[in-house]
Amino acid sequence: MGSIQPKLCCGLLNLGMTQRLTHGRLLQLIIWLMISIGLVTTPALAKQDNKKPSKRFTAERVFDMEYANDPQVSPDGKTIVYVRQSMDKMTDQDAGKLWILDIKSGTNRPLIADKNAASPRWSPDGKSLIFTSSHGGKPELRRVFIDSGMSFSLAQLHQGVSGVVWSQNGKQLAFSMFVEADKPSFATPLTPPKDAKWNKAFNVIDDLTFRFDGAGYLQDGATQIFTLPAGGGTPRQVTFEDSGLSNPQWQGNNTLLLTGNLAADRDLDPIESEIYTLDLTSLSISPLTTRDGPDHSPVVSPDGETIAFRGYDDKTLSYQQDDVYLIDADGANVRPLAETFAGSIGQTVWAPDGKSLLVLSEDYGVLSLFNITLKGKVSNIVTNIGGTSIGRPYASGSFSVSGDKNPVIAFTAGFSDRPAEVGLVSLKGRNPQILTALNEDVLPYLDLAPVEELKVKSSHDGLEIEAWVAFPPNFKADGTYPMILEIHGGPYAMYGPFFASEIQRYAAEGYVTVWVNPRGSTGYGEEFALAIDLAYPGYDYDDLMTVVNEVVAKKYADPERLFVTGGSGGGILTAWITTKTQRFAAAASIKPVINWMTMALAADIGQYVRRHWIRADPWADPEAFLKRSPIRYVDKVKTPTLLMVGEEDYRTPAWEAEQYYTALKMLEVDTALIRVPSAPHYIASRPSRLIGKTDNIMGWFAKYDPAKQESSEIKSEDVSQ
């Protein structure tokens, strides 16, 4: 209030008056005036502010959460720069800032004030970093020098860049960026008169994939590769293909490895990709790999002699795990590595000595980092990497490795009671440390939901199914609590025992909350995932019901107060469940697939659905699509069902949810439809949408909760008496 001057307070004070008043009397008068115009409140009006803050994880707490992301350890292993993510209340965004952490002293401080900083990458000499950002709504690629903390823009960009990498000598950068192309047209439009208000020009579409979730209707053009001097300047475009190329990696200082699909029929084979070499002198492109199947993510060994990459031979299945391969730098001698390793192959990095690869892998509900030697020997370095999926408990995280003689690994450490922190461990898995405590100002003062692991044998065939349960504060296993079954999407994805704001919200409002990795989930081997191939939804229903049975048997939940929800793949399973059973008091199907025919013909991944998931043509074999579609069995639904979808969702578009909603209305089943403005498939990408999503789901469940209905009836009887 120090900025408020007496002469501005309603014109009641002037300089002459203030000179004749004592300091104390003047202060009293100023306070009285501020009360009168509402600038401060009296104790009676401020009574609500004096209440003890709730110890529950309330909706407002979502905005308090912070987490570490993309930790990058310096080449000398002494410093970590990471993205500190926080929820910006004013912009309603999950915003990132760069922080720098001195490993020896533990000093943790801001490096860059940019609100939307991302993707920091160290220069080979460790003296500077590049990162992406935005200023005034325009994308930027910036460089910051560590000794001074000064940063500068490297180039004028009209599009955002991705996959920025340093050349080995530190003199050049390479990245990918979208380049617009001419729009197709069959006619030349007339030029309207000055100031005339004519209709916008027609949009002619001639690509199979013409819109994509998160991007909307696609511009004509392709992602091309650029180079740029590390000191800044004008980006040099070095590819000019009709289809996109991405993920550049330096092979020496004059050759790039790229990933893409330059085949003429690329739209019809959506998973296909090859690795190409690009000579920066001649700009000639040649394929390094040629097999039928996706080859991608090349990384060059420290001595430049060997390239590791990920991929598989395409068997036209709904899911296949990536394997890791080695190939000589000249393209000869392709060979698989660690063929007996059952885990999936994720982020892959060479160890500094070039004698092994570090591989991130989904590992039975958690993420683990493995060391795979060039002879195929596998050893575990660290587990419980994760914590960067702030909304739902997906396994999501990353790591980086230093380059000195005693390498250390920085990683995102996952927990059940807090979001991701920066972790550190030696290359041999020794001396693990957690270097940050980003939510120590909030979470220690809240009653967070404790998490328990469950393992059950599926009622279908005895297959072991892993699940987790989060309990409300002061929980007692007395069989009285409502339960929410929360089903993950994908379906080829994996939940884990990780902190998630949505789970905490449900538990804070009194719900026992259960999440499961049914058959079809990743992380349990390829056979486990493929158990739903051409059978989705299917016996994953039995897996989920077996878990619910166990929760009820343990008296964790009241069998009359069961609720079910899930998003995307979890949305279709929620809808499928309502066609199979009436045991749930209410359901909330979020961004579901309802009709595989419309999904195959109108979703952004329609060709993938047709070619890999259903493996049939909807016009020739409609039954192949309909037999796994909830819409086929909607006449069996009695459960009150809420539908929710983003208005800009092109993965499971709005018309999927609308079909189910309309059918339920026609059948006179209690239902409601929520359309989320501006939201793509990832509804929770904005904090307010995460809150609105969970609170509307719980509001729907409360409407049909038998215990709450009974309580309302008793209150009504008391009032009438």
Image: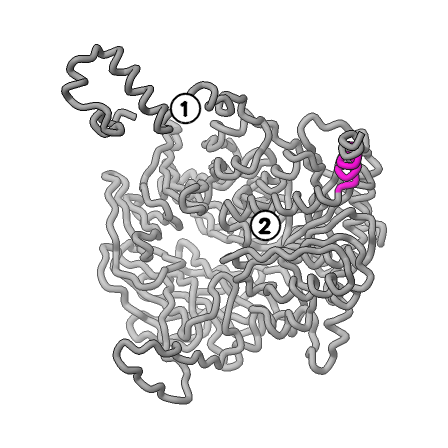
- The residue at the point 72 percent across, 54 percent down is 641
- In the displayed structure, would residue 106 be above or below residue 592? above
* Residue 580 belongs to the span the image colors magenta: no
- In the displayed structure, would residue 279 be above or below residue 300? below
As measured in the structure, the alpha-carbon distance from the residue carrying label 1 to the one carrying label 2 is 56 Å
Using the image as rendered, state which of residue 650 and residue 338 is in the foreground: 650
Q: Position of residue 88 (x, y in %)?
A: 42, 42
Q: Earlier in the sequence, mark 1 or mark 2?
A: 1
**SS for dot 2:** strand
- The residue at the point 65 percent across, 47 percent down is 697
Q: Is residue 708 left or right of residue 188?
A: right
Q: Position of residue 381 (x, y in %)?
A: 56, 41
Q: Position of residue 172 (x, y in %)?
A: 28, 59
Label 1 sits on what residue type?
Thr
- The residue at the point 74 percent across, 66 percent down is 631
Q: Is residue 217 left or right of residue 130?
A: right
Magenta range? 705-714
Return the mark for residue 41: 1
Using the image as rendered, state which of residue 565 and residue 162 is in the foreground: 565
* Residue 710 belongs to the span the image colors magenta: yes
Q: Position of residue 472 (x, y in %)?
A: 68, 32
Does residue 340 appear in this view? Answer: no
In the picture of the structure, the residue carrying the numbered disc 2 is 361
Label 2 sits on what residue type?
Ser
State the quadrant of the C terminus: top right
